């Protein structure tokens, strides 16, 4: 399975994003480390890598800065995926999003 080799990834099916801050913090996502190829590799690799890495960070940081994000008290987060070409959640995520900044009036 792509990116699911237990010889490379401990608990490959577990959602453990913290592994990229610890055991795998030096993995290169630009196509040089074949155990993780989110943008592909070689001549047909994604030409938008640099743009994408900056935009993902900017968009995520802006979102986290502007909103308080929580789940309803009775809700649970399930990480099970469906089978398919892309990763979809088997159980939809219920999220409450609340603005945490006072916007200037022109943005009302
Ligand atoms: C997080 C965001 C992105 C991811 C994960 C991603 C991932 C990928 C992957 C896996 C491929 C196929 C590589 C291959 O065939 O080996 C690809 C191709 C491509 N991507 Fe991205 N991409 C992202 C964002 C972007 C952006 C922002 C642009 C343009 C502004 C872009 C433009 C392209 C183009 C034009 C191709 C086709 C390249 C070719 O077939 O020669 N991508 N991308």
Image: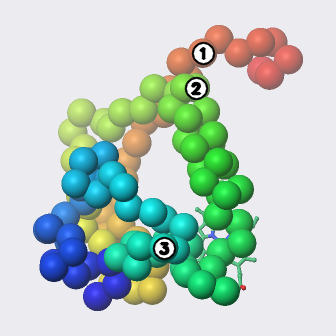
Q: Foreground: 68 or 9?
A: 9
Q: Quadrant of residue 40?
A: bottom right
Residue at x 31% of width, y 46% of height: 21
Residue 63: percent from left, percent from top: 57, 35
Q: Are marks 2 and 1 in contact (CB under 8 Å)?
A: yes
Closer to us: mark 3 or mark 2? Answer: 3
Residue behind mark 1: 101
Q: Residues within 10 Å of mark 1 (few under 14, many from 20)?
A: few
Q: Quadrant of the C terminus?
A: top right
Q: Are marks 1 and 3 in contact (CB under 8 Å)?
A: no
Give whichever of discs 3 and 2 has the lower sequence position. 3
Rendered position, 102 above or below 49 = above
Q: Quadrant of ligand 1?
A: bottom right
Residue at x 22% of width, y 54% of height: 23
Residue behind mark 2: 66
Q: Which mark is residue 32?
A: 3
Query: In this image, 68 relative to 50: left or right?
Result: left
Residue 87 visible, this angle: no
**Real-space Cα distance between discs 1 and 3?**
40 Å
**Real-space Cα distance between discs 3 and 2?**
35 Å
Residue 106: percent from left, percent from top: 85, 17
Rendered position, 69 above or below 51 = above
Residue 53: percent from left, percent from top: 60, 54
Q: Quadrant of residue 72?
A: top left
Give whichever of discs 2 and 1 has the lower sequence position. 2
Query: In this image, 95 relative to 66: left or right?
Result: left
Query: In this image, 19 relative to 56: left or right?
Result: left
């Amino acid at each position: 399975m792509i990116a699911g080799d237990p010889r490379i990834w401990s608990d490959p099916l577990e959602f453990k994003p913290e592994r990229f801050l610890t055991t795998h913090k030096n993995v290169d996502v630009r196509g040089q480390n074949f155990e993780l190829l989110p943008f592909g590799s070689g001549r047909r690799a994604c030409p938008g890598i640099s743009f994408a890495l900056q935009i993902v960070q900017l968009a995520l940081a802006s979102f986290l800065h502007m909103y308080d994000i929580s789940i309803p008290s009775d809700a649970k987060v399930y990480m099970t995926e469906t089978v398919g070409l892309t990763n979809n959640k088997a159980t939809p995520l219920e999220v409450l999003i609340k603005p945490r900044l006072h916007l200037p009036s022109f943005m009302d």
